[in-house]
């Protein structure tokens, strides 16, 4: 009778432990969680919100049953001679194994919540730590595997670690991308090469867009058509890329465009054109000073025939007008380079290049400023009796009168 009573006694004890363990997540959510919610909300509401997003408390519910089973069975007084001893030892062993397996998941959830909470802070934007947090997650995962194996086999972790040296080559092969990604992340972050929010171009991979995330293994970039591209972090070390961050921080974006003029329309300024150009306020001072300069220069070179002496040209006046127009434009950054220059002539004509910077880096504003400038300049060309090059269209051909 005593043996039977022992069996039933242990059976009910074991059954009670399992029922209590299975109900523990419900007890935690209904009774403990509300109190934790109040405490965390007082300190950091955003952090608690992130805990909910990463399902931290849901994950904690998984660890409660094996944790309670392990604690209860460890404190249950059962001798080796009693029945169900081996079964209870196996159950406790399994519970301990599950604790080791679920604990890293819990830590990873906490790390993810902290990363989501603080990644927009100024320090973390300037020095992104996402890659290092991913590395920390990986280390926790590896350590948990080693501890789980040691726990099941009753081995010392140091014995396992000493044997890893022989598997170094295999580990290097398995974790090659991780190691390369870590090295790339250190160089990228250490040198300030790339951070979230940067506009980068990686022509070898046909990537052009804004960096969304720089991780340990991969980089996520959002292109301007709203598509998302990912590529290995190590590509930053292997390939050449362009980062536009300095442009956005400098406060000015470059305009570099040309207007191609027909060389046949280039000529000396006659009296009529000169008088017409004098009516342009931006050019008046230039024309007077240039005219006086040319007169003095020609006076000092009386031996030169007047037909080949220095004269003002319409293209020179146009260049001067462009420069003055840009110099006085409210949207041009005068603290940066401003050039209006001729490029070598080609089969299309003579290119006049405008090289300047706007005082804004916003894409929409930049495009509007650039368009407004060239709208005006293209419309002003005819005032200088110049002609912009354009391939003949069907309308031009129809205007040709044959003899």
Image (cartoon, rainbow, N blue to C red):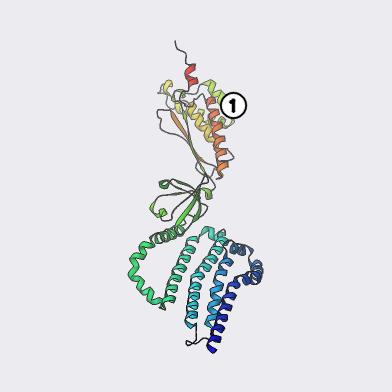
Q: Is residue 342 above or below residue 182?
A: above
Horizontal and vertical percent position of residue 249: 53, 50
The residue at the point 64 percent across, 64 percent down is 45
Q: Is residue 60 left or right of residue 310?
A: right
Residue 177 placement (x, y as % from top left): 40, 59
Q: Position of residue 256 (x, y in %)?
A: 48, 38
SS for tag 1?
A: loop
74 relative position to 171: left or right: right
Q: Is residue 112 visible?
A: yes
Residue placed farthest to the top in the image? 403
Q: Is residue 255 above or below residue 312?
A: below
Foreground residue among 378 and 178: 178
| Residue furthest bottom as drawn | 2
Label 1: few (<14), some or many (≥20) within 10 Å?
A: few
Residue 118 spot, x, y in % from top left: 57, 61
In the current view of this chain or complex, which residue is farthest to the front? 1
Residue 193 in view (yes/no): no
For the residue pair 62 and 163, the one nearer the viewer reads as: 62
- Which is nearer the eye, 313 or 59? 59
Residue at the (57%, 42%) spot, across then down: 364
Left or right: 55, with 167 as reference point = right
Q: Which residue is mark 1?
A: 279
Q: In the rendered view, tell whether residue 312 sits above or below residue 33.
A: above
Residue 46 figure quarter: bottom right
228 over 39 or under it: above or below: above
């Amino acid at each position: 009778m005593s043996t039977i009573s022992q069996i039933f006694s242990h059976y009910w004890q074991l059954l009670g432990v399992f029922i209590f363990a299975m109900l523990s997540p419900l007890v935690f959510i209904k009774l403990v969680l509300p109190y934790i919610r109040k405490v965390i909300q007082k300190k950091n509401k955003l952090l608690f919100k992130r805990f909910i997003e990463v399902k931290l408390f849901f994950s904690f519910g998984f660890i409660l049953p094996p944790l309670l089973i392990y604690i209860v069975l460890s404190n249950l007084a059962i001798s080796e001679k009693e029945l169900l001893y081996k079964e209870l030892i196996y159950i406790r062993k399994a519970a301990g194994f599950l604790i080791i397996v679920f604990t890293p998941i819990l830590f990873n959830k906490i790390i993810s919540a902290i990363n989501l909470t603080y990644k927009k802070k100024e320090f973390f934007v300037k020095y992104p730590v996402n890659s290092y947090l991913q590395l920390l997650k990986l280390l926790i995962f590896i350590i948990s595997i080693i501890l789980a194996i040691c726990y099941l086999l009753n081995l010392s972790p140091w014995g396992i670690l000493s044997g890893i040296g022989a598997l170094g080559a295999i580990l290097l092969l398995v974790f090659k991308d991780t190691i390369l990604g870590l090295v790339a992340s250190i160089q990228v972050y250490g040198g300030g090469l790339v951070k979230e929010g940067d506009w980068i171009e990686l022509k070898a991979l046909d990537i052009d867009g804004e960096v969304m995330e720089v991780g340990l293994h991969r980089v996520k970039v959002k292109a301007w058509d709203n598509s998302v591209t990912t590529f290995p972090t190590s590509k930053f070390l292997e390939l050449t890329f362009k980062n536009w961050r300095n442009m956005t921080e400098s406060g000015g974006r470059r305009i570099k465009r040309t207007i191609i003029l027909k060389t046949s329309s280039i000529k000396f300024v006659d009296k009529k054109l000169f008088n017409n150009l004098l009516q342009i306020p931006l050019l008046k001072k230039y024309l007077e000073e240039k005219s006086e300069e040319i007169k003095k220069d020609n006076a000092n070179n009386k031996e030169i025939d007047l037909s080949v002496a220095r004269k003002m040209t319409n293209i020179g006046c146009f260049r001067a007008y462009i420069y003055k127009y840009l110099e006085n434009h409210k949207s041009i950054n005068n603290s940066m380079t401003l050039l209006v220059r001729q490029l070598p002539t080609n089969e299309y004509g003579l290119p006049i290049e405008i090289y300047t910077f706007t005082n804004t880096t916003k894409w929409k504003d930049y495009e509007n400023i650039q368009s407004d400038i060239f709208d005006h300049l293209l419309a002003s060309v005819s005032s200088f009796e110049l002609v912009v090059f354009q391939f003949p269209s069907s309308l031009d051909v129809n205007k040709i009168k044959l003899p």
